[in-house]
Image (cartoon, coloured by chain):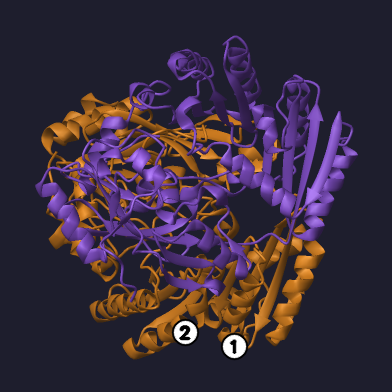
Chain colours: A orange, B purple
Amino acid sequence: MFRELARLLPADRVILDSSELAVYECDALPVHRRAPDAVVLCETRDEVVAVVRWCGERGVPFVPRGAGTGLSGGCTPLQGGVVLDLNRMNRIKRIDPENRFAVVEPGLINVRLTEEAEPHGFHYAPDPSSQTACTLGGNVAENSGGPHCLKYGVTSDHILGLEMVLPDASVVRLGGPLADHPGADLVGLFVGAEGTFGIVTEITVRLTPSPRTVRTFLAIFGTMAAACRTVTHITREGILPVALEILDQRTIRAVEASVFAAGYPEDAAAVLLIELDGFEAGMDEDEAAIERIVRANDPLEWRTARDERERTMLWKGRKGAFGAMGRVDTDLYVLDGVVPRTALEATLTKVYEIADRYGVRVSNVFHAGDGNLHPNLSYDGRDADVTRRVLDAGREMLEACVAAGGSISGEHGIGSEKKEFMPLLFDEDDLDLQITVRGVIDPNGIANPGKVFPDRRAKVVTRR
Amino acid sequence: MTVHAVTRPASAAEQDHYPDAGREIAVPADAVDLADRIRAAEAEGRPVLPAGEGAHAAWGDPPPPGALVLSTAAFDEVALYEPDDFTIGVGAGMKLADLRALLRSHGQEIPFEWPAAAGGTVGGMVARAAGGPRQGRYGPPASFVLGVEGVRGEGRPFRAGGMVVKNVAGYQLAKLVVGAMGGAGFLLRVNFKLRPLPAARRLSVATFSTAAEAWARTAELRAARLEPAALLVLDGTARSVAAAGASGADGGATLAWVFEGGDATVAWQHSECERLGFQEAKSFSEAQGDAADELLERSAAYSETDRLSPADTGIVRLSVLPSVLPGAAAAVAETFSTLSGFEAGTLADAATGLLTVRWTGPPESIDAPVTALREIVRAKEGTGRLLHLPGSARRRHRHALHDDPNEALAEAVLAAFDPHGTFARRPA
């Protein structure tokens, strides 16, 4: 049956060979795997429409995919079907500096937009750690974050409009570059829907003026508690840095043993990376205030980047942290819990305690200013017992985040990874409502099925 | 626990706006009581209207006949406030003035403007997505709402989002609730992200002989890449926002801008404006503190209905690209100059392209400005919202300015909250 797809697209853009399909069996979360029955490399919206219509007529599931850098199994085709690879839909259609927006296709790599907007004095603010590889379509699907979202907000705050191919193959244009669109905020609803509402074929994004000045600092601490307290004290003072990032000792050691070595002292318990941006005026005052707070929390060291080279160096370890962690063992499970900022220290203590209890290795590198934790569990996925303990420990860590008043995902999405944890946050009524909304938009459940909702609940679909 | 009366007297405004509700407004005592009343109303096929103080009641369509008006008064408490987390969860019935006072006492704010004189509650502000002149700098109201709780159709509780500043668990249903005009259900609680109050705020007001001059300086200010918290071009009666009694009768226009933030940042941006010669206007004044606060508040009030005499007042808000805004504002001014018996003003937010048009004129001639504004929206590829029209014209012109191409999809999604259509949806 899937050979019929070659009638919709040129044959060289339809993949049916099982060895090639294996490439598409998971994203950057290796826990769940399933190869699709077919992959189509779409180049236009009309091709997306044709493929979605074909799937709809046959009840075949479809899953959109960008760079496959997601960390929640969002584009893993759990029920087989067709994967629509959107990497070739990567054009920048318009950059409008005067009105501060751009129109792009979903396969555009995140950092490319900033590269193109920079000469106009603008950038695209959300910057996931994978920004040199991840696509904006994937960012929209997962409502991605990044280190600089502390000041500028997550993807949802930067998406003005979407062109979507809905599961019935109809095309809708939601929102746009205007500040106000009468009617319900469907753009807000569709961002972060993880591909379950259809496929994004065009994105209108907000462009943010690039800062005139950036200052980057590194505070090195002998205890994680001091690093967390420093974060709370900085935000309490009303200072809004553009980034507040913490790496723990195990991450520091992994980084320093890798090509991403940034000169962090290996005996430090935590390093806190602080970045300010804005006008030069006022920067001295904010820097002085931050240094005062850091020094009050007994740091081992305080470093200031004096130029762009030093700034790049301070960031090098943070940006390379996940790459460095990849060397620790064959597999890496990256969690994504969120807690109120004031609960950071207590929650981290629990995270280490849980890891010890399950006998698994955890390291932490996280967006401290947002309270967004990333406990990283390094393990050998070929060992079933270790894998089970890693998953159980991960669940308990997310339970600790929820117990602290937080959430099970800050920026990676629920995907297949955390769908069974949704009842930690939402009761039956809440899940019913979300599943009913899904049923309105995808009554036959063919858009990225098996994601976001617990398997037991997801089957309840209200038909229009 | 506070014990509430089962009903309370309807205010004069509420009696105006909810004529079928009678002289009393039902006040559910708690969420269980509320759910019972919603189910009872559904059993009778009676529409339900959530209501706070009635401050926003004149917005959008008139309420449907026979609507049961349910007060949010019992849900007026702070559920959770952790100043160090810069988040707060409050009952939808909390008075905006109380919320603002509480936050100010901790040096914090939600950067939306709401006119204190108009009163109003959190639920109304969220239902209406009432923002204000600082949206261009800080983003729309929805970006400050972290989570919501409420009771929807069939008396079922709902909850979306949460209490943390980053959260992508499940669909962003809270975004849908903001601005839904009550169509998603009865709000019980709203969780907000907060900002620190700016240490300094500085207002500058320059008047020019012509609107074209004001717009030319606005373009320079934007090109200078400064970061005003508000950047407003005021024409016609809107000039009273910056100076009491100013009417625009002299054909001039007013440019008002506010810088806020740290002392040094504000001072430097102000000096940049001086360097660009902004004080060389026809007249120029500046102020700090209260005067700047008042300008922000008055500019928000400009799009509020006058509860006492709405009969001759029309208010619409157009949205165009900022680059098109000067032309749109000029077209509006031109339109009203040709209509006899009308007096109008425009408040243009140069950062967002939002253009609030407010006029008074003979109610029987209301079709003329609405038709002209529709043409302007079409010509400028914009959108429009009818915020207020007198009496029956509200319903007649509900789609006059902009047909929402996705209305059917939006209605279908909202029906997930409200399968029986109990919560009257009132576009504004």
Tell me the residue that label 1 is attached to: A223
Tell me the residue that label 2 is attached to: A346
| Residue B350 is at least partly visible in this image | yes
Callouts 2 and 1 in the same chain: yes
Q: Secondary structure at mark 1?
A: loop
A219, B221: nearer the viewer: B221
Residue A383 % position (x, y): 27, 77
Q: Give how far apart the Cα atoms at labels 2 and 1 are.
A: 13 Å
Q: Secondary structure at mark 2?
A: helix
B193, A283: nearer the viewer: B193
Residue B342 % position (x, y): 57, 17
Subunit of label 2:
A
Residue A49 % position (x, y): 28, 29
Subunit of label 1:
A
Kindly identify the residue that appears in the image at 83 percent across and 41 percent down: B285
Marks 2 & 1, CB-CB < 8 Å contact: no
Mark 2 surroundings: few (<14), some (14-19) or many (≥20) residues within 10 A: few
A67, A351: nearer the viewer: A351
Give the number of the disc on residue B282: none
Residue A212 % position (x, y): 75, 49
Image-based side of A258 in relation to B161, left or right: right
**Callout 1, which amino acid?**
Thr
**Callout 2, which amino acid?**
Ala
Query: Based on the displayed image, in which of its 4 quarters is residue B223 positioned?
Result: top right
Q: In the rendered view, tell whether residue B423 sits above or below residue B6.
A: above
